[in-house]
Image (spheres, helix red, strand yellow):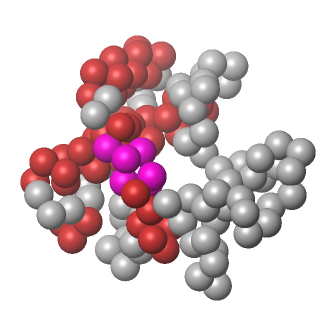
Amino acid sequence: MVLDSNQSQRKAVSNSDGRPVFHKQANKPIDSEAPALSHSTVHRWLGFIGAMTITLQIGAEALLQADPNSSIHRFLGLVDPKRARTQERLKVLSVARRLLHLQTLWDRQFLTCPFFARFATVARPP
């Protein structure tokens, strides 16, 4: 979503046919009464992740110590300027993108110690 200027936050929380994505609660079927994922939730998630600048810095340093050939220092995390109304938000989105890239590299390097151990930052099929 951050990469594609045509992908909106509303589209990110909708199925391909435009129906909203519903929150699946354990042991309950998904129906029209289930809470739908809001586009503002994605906005807040990206803001939360993008504010983790110290986590990005320390994580990148630790990854480079474990793997000096890592590409983490070459990844700029550029974001389409159409994705944000302000330079501050653009910077937040860039940090979020770099942190999610760091997560990918980290999880490959440290198989038994995930970067975000308790966050659902990656969609995995059940």
Q: Please name whichever residue, 76 or 82, is drawn nearer the observer in this view of the structure.
A: 82
Q: Percent position (x, y) of residue 12?
A: 50, 67
The answer to whether residue 75 is seen in the rendering is: no
Q: Percent position (x, y) of residue 42?
A: 44, 54
| Residue depicted at x 33% and y 17% | 58
| Residue depicted at x 64% and y 57% | 35
Q: Percent position (x, y) of residue 61?
A: 34, 18
Q: Percent position (x, y) of residue 65?
A: 40, 14
How many numbered marks does the figure carry? 0
Task: Please indicate whether residue 39 sits to the left or right of residue 60 in the image.
Answer: right
The answer to whether residue 5 is seen in the rendering is: yes
Task: Identify the magenta region.
Answer: 41-47
Task: Please indicate whether residue 12 sits to the left or right of residue 69 in the image.
Answer: right
Reply above or below: 74 against 57. Answer: below
| Residue depicted at x 32% and y 29% | 52
Task: Please indicate whether residue 88 sits to the left or right of residue 41 in the image.
Answer: left
Which residue, as the protein is rendered here, is positioned at the far front?
33
The majority secondary structure of the magenta stretch comes to helix
Quadrant in the rendering for residue 2 = bottom left
Q: Please name whichever residue, 44 or 91, is drawn nearer the observer in this view of the structure.
A: 44
Quadrant in the rendering for residue 84 = bottom left
Q: Please name whichever residue, 105 or 99, is drawn nearer the observer in this view of the structure.
A: 99
The N terminus: image quadrant: bottom left
Residue 125 part of the magenta segment? no
| Residue depicted at x 19% and y 54% | 90
Which residue, as the protein is rendered here, is positioned at the far bottom?
17
Q: Please name whichever residue, 34 or 86, is drawn nearer the observer in this view of the structure.
A: 34
Quadrant in the rendering for residue 57 = top left
Residue 44 part of the magenta segment? yes
